[in-house]
Amino acid sequence: FAPFGASGGGAVARSNFTGYSGSAFATKGLTITPAVEIVVRDFVTLANTVAGAQYQASIFTYSGTTLGPVIQLSDILTPGAGSATQLNFSFPGATIPAGQKACLLVSRIDGANTYAFPLAFGAGQGTGWPTLGTVEAVRIAKAVPANGDTISIPGGDPFGLMVVFGAT
């Protein structure tokens, strides 16, 4: 693992949080197509959370509007109720090859597929995105996404994830 950045801690890509999504999708996130092979270590986001609810992050491949195989799942979080709750998801090292289209997703996994998950969204693509290629918002009307599910790429500002990654 050879991290980007002078600090040796890896690169961070983020969008600027400006609000919370109200669209009826239980899973939301970003699409990326990295220019080089990367290893995703963490992602962090803000969400308005519900007491007793469970949240999980996942990384999937995709083609067109269809999810492919899962690359990796995070542990499940149960943070309690709160506004602007910070959700920290870690991965032991999710490798995404150069040129591989991937979805970085956050889901409320214990609710309805059409739960309007209030995930933060951002304005603009922030810093560090060139290595990740074209970054777009993605939504899925599934609480627990799986290979073969249909995704929606609505365009516009991306959902607000801060992604910590490095090159292999």
Image: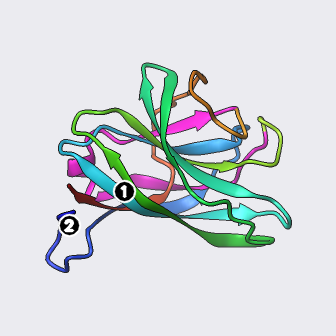
Q: Compared to 24, does 20 lie above or below?
A: below
Does the magenta-highlighted stretch encompass residue 124?
A: yes
Q: Quadrant of the N terminus?
A: bottom left
Judging from the image, what secondary structure is the residue with disc 2 in? loop
The picture places residue 124, in percent across and down from the top left corner, at 37, 52
Going 20% across and 55% down the picture, which residue do you hit? 168
Closest to the observer: 108 or 139? 108
The colour scheme used here is: rainbow
Image check: 131 left or right of 27?
A: left
Residue 134 appears at what percent x and percent y? 29, 38
Mark 2, other Cα within 10 Å: few <14 / some 14–19 / many ≥20: some
Classify mark 1: residues with Cα within 10 Å, few (<14), some (14-19) or many (20+).
many
Which residue is label 1 attached to?
A: 40
Of 73 and 101, which appears nearest the observer?
A: 73
Could you say which disc has been placed on residue 144 in the image?
none
Was residue 17 drawn as part of the magenta stretch in this picture? Answer: no
Question: How far apart are the alpha carbons under marks 1 and 2?
Answer: 11 Å
For badge 1, the amino acid type reads Val
Residue extending furthest toward the left? 6
Residue at disc 1, secondary structure: strand
Residue at the bottom extreme of this rendering: 7
Q: Identify residue type, mark 2.
A: Pro
Q: Which residues are magenta?
A: 115-141
Mark on residue 3? 2
